């Protein structure tokens, strides 16, 4: 990954009394959020999330932050603070706990409950939990933490103020400033202002929507739109949203009650998360409204509502299987209505439109963000960020959580409110920022890349092997088997050529067989008798021929057998 400071080398030792910030994920991408704070030789970690793979990550299930920069200092971690329960903030926690199982976990009630179910899936037992709520203060080593309520697209989100001898850092987590939220829990600007009066030395702010002007639309504006969708539909309604979006599910439940429909959850994570939210009182479910999906199928279509996972077009999700007509018990019928109640995560557009087209092919009406207000963002837009900068009046700013363009837009907002340009620090994953004597500055960078999870293996897949997979997927491969006489050096058998994903007709390769035989003979004449070198000769001959004749660059796998 490129850095805004490519010339940087390893950071020097942290000056005494300084606070070091090392982002290991989330700066330069949407997801994989993880930030390490160091003070007096001790570490505090804020968030530990995953990034979901895109089409250029074939075979990859998840992408983790790189723990390597802190791997030999895991014992120095005082606590892991989780700002909220989204996968891009808690999804990598099980992988960190595999490396040190007794790291104290700090988070709100819902966040820790969602994490607990994840740890059970990973067969991890973890008992060191500290449940916190807004207004709480708790100390871990040299870190004095205070938690502030923030509004987001999942209940119980928190910002965290971190006090050390180096000053006060305020990390917003993901947040917005919905003034009329469904749960009446607003972002606590009074606490932001109070912390601003105390003096915020470093303000780490969510950048995701910094390019969007104005204020983020309130969640409540979706309610009448959903009501109209329910009113207009005389058949089954399927709503797809994130498996953690409790507020959106609540709105769908309320609409179902108003229109005398029953609801079923589809997708393992949706079922699990909504049961947790209901048990903890974050989701209000009137008696008899939610039924088992198979029970729902016995009702007439005009009384059915399904709430499903898969709003991002994930290939194995419930909605994708429904669109492909290979779901166990949900089959799209002409006249069904499907509502995609989520935003498009950058990089997922093609997958989502593929699902929309698949649903439309079977006659479904698809309602999505592009044609109706069925989703609002969970992140503060530019107007809200300006408001926060003016309330907090930070001495130094470090934009976090976003792609480069989002963080640059956030930095421009900070400068516009009067934060001096030299105190708005731009960093990316691995770029180290020190707060010393009240001033934040970039001091170096550590190596940190993507860690790929592929099935049960973690970190075994490299960029090189991903490149090989992409070539195989896009260009195909050719195998060439040649038997060489170990005495004469001449071809004694073959070449036998097979291809996949390139040209299935083996007669395609008749023209290249003699050039391979000639090249091997010529190489042997020059004294080349090592099988590896002969393989390289064959690879070059075939590669030039394929490129010149077919304008393709498949993977070429030569095998030389001595006889």
Image (spheres, rainbow, N blue to C red):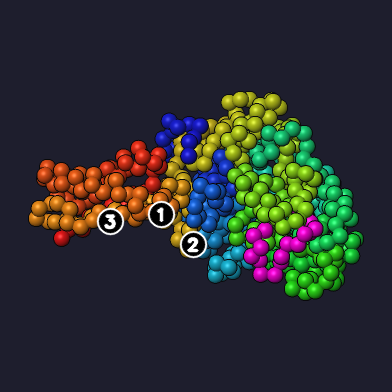
Whole-percent x and y of residue 561?
21, 58
User: Answer yes or no: do the residues labelled 3 and 2 have beta carbons within 8 Å?
Assistant: no
- Label annotation for residue 496: 3
Question: What residue is shown with label 2?
Answer: 455
Q: Residues within 10 Å of mark 1 (few under 14, many from 20)?
A: few
Q: Nearer the viewer, residue 424 or 64?
A: 64
Question: What residue is shown with label 1?
Answer: 504
Which is in the foreground here, disc 2 or disc 1?
Answer: 1
Residue at horizontal 63%, vertical 36%?
Answer: 406
Whole-percent x and y of residue 320?
65, 58
Rendered image quadrant of residue 248: bottom right
| Mark closer to the chain start, 3 or 2 | 2
Q: Residues within 10 Å of mark 2 (few under 14, many from 20)?
A: few
Magenta segment, which residues? 323-339
User: Answer yes or no: do the residues labelled 2 and 1 have beta carbons within 8 Å?
Assistant: no
User: Dot 2: what SS?
Assistant: loop
Residue at horizontal 84%, vertical 46%?
Answer: 221
């Amino acid at each position: 990954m490129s850095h805004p400071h490519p010339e940087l080398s390893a950071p020097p030792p942290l000056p005494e009394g300084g606070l070091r910030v090392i982002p290991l994920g989330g700066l330069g991408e949407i997801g994989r959020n993880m930030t390490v704070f160091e003070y007096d030789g001790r570490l505090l970690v804020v968030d530990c999330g995953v990034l979901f793979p895109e089409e250029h990550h074939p075979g990859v299930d998840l992408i983790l932050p790189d723990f390597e920069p802190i791997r030999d200092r895991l014992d120095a971690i005082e606590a892991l603070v989780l700002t909220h329960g989204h996968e891009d903030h808690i999804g990598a926690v099980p992988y960190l706990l595999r490396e040190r199982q007794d790291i104290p976990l700090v988070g709100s009630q819902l966040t820790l409950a969602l994490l607990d179910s994840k740890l059970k899936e990973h067969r991890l037992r973890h008992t060191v939990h500290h449940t916190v709520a807004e207004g709480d203060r708790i100390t871990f080593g040299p870190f004095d933490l205070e938690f502030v309520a923030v509004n987001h697209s999942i209940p119980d989100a928190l910002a965290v103020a971190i006090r050390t001898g180096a000053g006060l850092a305020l990390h917003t987590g993901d947040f917005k400033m919905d003034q009329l939220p469904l749960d009446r829990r607003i972002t606590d600007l009074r606490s932001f202002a109070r912390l601003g009066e105390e003096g915020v030395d470093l303000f780490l702010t969510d950048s995701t929507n910094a390019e969007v002007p104005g204020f983020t639309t309130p969640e409540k504006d979706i309610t009448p739109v959903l009501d109209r969708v329910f009113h207009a539909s005389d058949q089954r309604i399927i709503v797809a949203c994130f498996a953690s979006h409790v507020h959106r599910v609540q709105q769908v439940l309320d609409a179902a009650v108003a229109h005398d429909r029953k609801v079923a959850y589809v997708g393992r994570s949706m079922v699990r998360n909504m049961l947790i939210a209901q048990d903890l009182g974050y989701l209000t479910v009137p008696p008899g409204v939610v039924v088992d999906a198979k029970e729902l199928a016995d009702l007439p279509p005009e009384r059915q509502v399904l709430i499903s996972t898969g709003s991002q077009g994930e290939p194995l999700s419930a909605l994708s299987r429904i669109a492909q007509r290979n779901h166990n018990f949900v089959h799209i019928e002409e006249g069904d209505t499907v509502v995609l109640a989520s935003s498009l995560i950058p990089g997922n557009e093609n997958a989502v439109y593929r699902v929309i087209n698949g649903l439309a092919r079977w006659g479904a009406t698809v309602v999505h963000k592009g044609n109706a207000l069925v989703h609002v963002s969970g992140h503060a837009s530019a107007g809200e960020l300006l408001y926060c900068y003016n309330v907090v009046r930070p001495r130094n700013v470090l934009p976090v959580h976003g792609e480069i363009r989002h963080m640059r837009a956030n930095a421009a907002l900070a400068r516009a409110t009067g934060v001096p340009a030299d105190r708005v620090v731009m960093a990316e994953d691995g770029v180290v920022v020190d707060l010393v004597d009240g001033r934040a500055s970039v001091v170096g960078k550590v190596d940190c890349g993507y860690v790929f999870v592929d099935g049960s293996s973690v970190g075994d897949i490299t960029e090189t092997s991903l490149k090989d997979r992409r070539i195989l997927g896009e260009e195909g491969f050719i195998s060439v088997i040649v038997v060489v006489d170990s005495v004469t050096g001449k071809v004694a058998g073959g070449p036998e050529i097979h291809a996949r994903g390139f040209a299935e007709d083996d007669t395609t390769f008749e023209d290249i067989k003699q050039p391979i035989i000639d090249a091997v003979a010529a190489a042997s004449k020059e004294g080349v008798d090592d099988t590896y070198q002969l393989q390289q000769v064959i690879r070059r001959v075939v590669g030039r021929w394929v490129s010149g004749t077919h304008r393709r660059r498949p993977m070429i796998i030569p095998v030389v057998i001595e006889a």
